Image (tube, grey):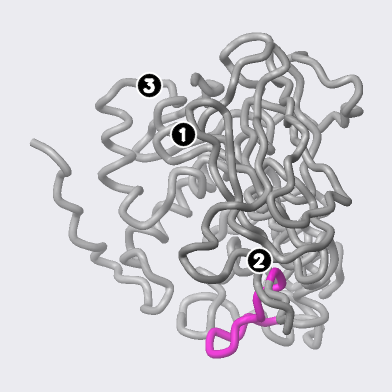
Amino acid sequence: MRLYRATTVFGGALIVAAALMSRSITPAAAQQATDRSPPMDELQRADQIYQFKKAAVSGAERGREIFYYKCWFCHNEFTKDVPKLEGLFTHATLWSGQLVTDDTVKNQIRNGSADMAAYKYALSEDDLNDLVAFLREKCCWNSDAPPLNPAYRASAVPAPGAAQSDRLRGGPHGIVKSAEGYLLEGMMVQLIAKNNTIRTTVFTDGDGRYEFPQLVSGAYTLHIAQPREFFAYARDGVDIDGATALPDIVLKRIAKSDVLPPSAEIAAQMTGSEWLMSLSGSGAEKRLLTVNCNWCHSYQQIFRNRYDEAGWSKILHRMIHGAGSPLINVNSRGRRAAPPMWS
């Protein structure tokens, strides 16, 4: 499967991902190949991760997540060469001399400074609002006591499918196929329990068939995890009782061609190999990225970011001289170059 072509600019190891198209919500009844961005799947954890919405959809808790991924590497309790942000809103002024307000803090994040990258291309207005809410209300990140996993739900109800090996089959089953009638192999089919949100996932075989283990009877949501080139699929209120035969799951393609539109929903589901394959540039340029950046970062973590050239230079300086870790002070001599992966 060919994925969208990302735009890359190699200067050292500067990478700029392709601009993402805005979301468009398409009613299920009208889904067809349109070469437009698919609607967001609220159950898709890959998209929750990509949109910084694992912890919360909005507000200070979402801001905590953004802070961890965007700010903590530099503004943590271990470094000595950057200002600490805890208690920021108890101070009268910023280092720049401006009064501490929501707007001045957001402008500082947007525009950066001599030692800080500008995040005006990397964070949206909603991102900034949530991040500033966290800085004002809850800052900062406690490395010794990170927040609880919001997806975890404790329950006394037996976990679906969690039993002896003789229960690994004999549960709900069905077929996944395309709107054109092709049987789809390798699709991830989920049943999400309503009583405790536990997800059980199986894969379709070469004939498009899937079979779950024996599950606790009750109401579930039938969901396709990572549909990628197909529109999202979720069906609520599916009653499961033993070896329930489920209706065929029919998936409709997003694009008319094999090249998918550059949407956040699709980008969130791409593997590292697919990110690398979708890049423009020569093999030597991609090797530069692989040797110098993929030691610490997934490709998605790199390509989802957007900075201007000055911002990328500052980010790379921090990566190189910080020796790939926020837990030590910046090393002015730099770190030892990584050995080549091949000769």
Residue under numbered circle 1: 275
Question: Badge 3, how many Cα within 10 Å: few under 14, some, many 20+?
Answer: few
Q: Earlier in the sequence, mark 1 or mark 3?
A: 1
Q: Position of residue 70 (x, y in %)?
A: 60, 61
Distance from Cα at disc 1 to Cα at disc 3: 13 Å
Residue linked to disc 2: 160
| Residues packed near mark 1 inside 10 Å, few (<14), some (14 to 19) or many (20 plus) | some
The vertical placement of 259 against 325, above or below, is above
Residue drawn at x 53%, y 37% is 270
In this view, 330 is above or below 110: below
Q: Name the residue under label 3.
A: 281
Q: As shown in the figure, which amino acid type bears the numbered disc 1?
A: Trp
Q: How far apart are marks 2 and 1 (CA)?
A: 34 Å
Helix, strand or loop at mark 3? loop
**Which residue is depicted at the point 74% across and 47% down?**
244
Q: Which of marks 2 and 3 is in front?
A: 2
